[in-house]
Amino acid sequence: MAETLARTRSFTNPIHAILLAFPVALYPAALLSDITYLNTAVIQWTNFSSWLIAGADVFAGLVLAWALVSQFLGRTRPRGWAYVIVVALMFIAGVLNAFQHARDGWHSVGTFGLVLSILCTILAFVAAFLAYGQTQVKEYRA
């Protein structure tokens, strides 16, 4: 009798998940502190955002390096290049965001800093979805 087994598996391994968890958590936290700064004008919120973005950028760089090595060693599945592109865009936007937040005063966040924080947050969520959205694998046994 033939049977079909369906199971799900993630796109990458557990260490990669730990590395990706930091940008997924830190970019939205930076976005929230940017919004808080724009509402309160307390300068400490921009400092907090800068440190959150710097931490997210460090781990985004590690995630990008890991994704590139995995892609070139052939350890990924078909959506691997889409994931690498999203992570690369997230890293580039994060570095630009860090430069923007390094500016002085009100201009450090402003409209462009907020847009970059929103973009980094969206790209981090898309990267997490691409990496850990469920992939269904069907096995047919005779």
Image (spheres, grey):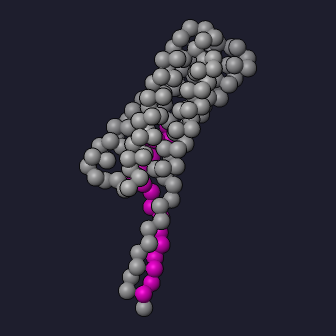
- Residue 50 lies, in percent from the top left, at 54, 20
Is residue 45 within the magenta segment?
no
Q: Quadrant of the C terminus?
A: bottom left
Question: Which residue is located at x 40 percent, y 79 percent?
Answer: 140
Tell me if residue 93 comes above or below residue 81 in the rendering: above
- Residue 44 lies, in percent from the top left, at 63, 15
Occupied quadrant, residue 105: top right
Of residues 92 and 32, the one drawn nearer to the viewer in this rendering: 92
Of residues 13 and 3, the one drawn nearer to the viewer in this rendering: 3
Residue sticking out furthest to the top? 104
- Residue 80 lies, in percent from the top left, at 38, 50
Residue sticking out furthest to the bottom? 1
Q: Is residue 50 visible?
A: yes
Q: Which residues are magenta?
A: 2-22
Q: Is residue 6 left or right of residue 76?
A: right
Question: Which residue is located at x 60 percent, y 31 percent?
Answer: 118
Is residue 17 within the magenta segment?
yes
Question: Which residue is located at x 56 percent, y 32 percent?
Answer: 119
Q: Is residue 24 visible?
A: no
Residue sticking out furthest to the left? 73
Q: Quadrant of the N terminus?
A: bottom left
